[in-house]
Image (cartoon, rainbow, N blue to C red):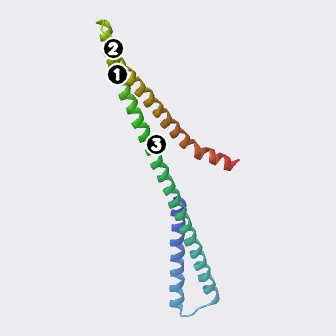
Amino acid sequence: MSEIDELQRRITAAMDRVAKGIDTLSSAGREDAETARALEEERTANAQLTERVRALKSRADEEMAALHDQISAGEARMAQLDIELQRVRRANTQLSDACAALRAANEEGVGEPHLINKAMLAELEGLRAARAADVAEASAILDALTPLVASAEENA
């Protein structure tokens, strides 16, 4: 961005010099070859600087758009990972509750099959949720590493 500010300052200065040159030409009432050449040089410099500013602004806009896309993708991955971790927490809570109920039934000497089934289902759900969280985490890591590997390959 400092390059853009510097180029903008230079363009403004060039335009001021051009304006002064035009004022000098009109006040003198004559056009001499040296002034015309200097004016043309200033116009050329002004056009070059304007094009450079335009190119820098375009490149900066493209880079900003790419960064916004990366941020959005990262936020989406983190949201998915958060959902999966919440699912793991819920499954673990269900598993703890089912195990507590099963322990209580066993202490009373009453083996209730539905409590065993409930505990097994809670454990399976916990395992599925943990697997989904692992997959989401691995996906987030892979997505973060992919651009780094690509840039390393380009540099090699």
Label 1, residues with CA under 10 Å away: few <14, some 14-19, many ≥20: some
How far apart marks 2 and 1 lie (CA) works out to 9 Å
Q: Is residue 86 left or right of residue 67?
A: left
In front here: 116 or 156?
116
Which residue is tagged 3?
A: 77
- The answer to the question of whether label 2 and label 1 lie on touching residues, with beta carbons closer than 8 A, is yes
Label 2, residues with CA under 10 Å away: few <14, some 14-19, many ≥20: many
Name the residue at the left extreme. Answer: 108
Which residue is pictured at 30% across the width and 6% down the height? 109
Amino acid under label 1?
Lys
Which residue is tagged 2?
A: 102
Mark 2 or 3 closer to N-term?
A: 3
Q: Secondary structure at mark 1?
A: helix
Amino acid under label 3?
Arg
Q: Is residue 37 left or right of residue 68?
A: right
Task: Name the front one of labels 3 and 1.
Answer: 1
**Residue 103 coordinates in the image, percent (x, y):** 33, 11
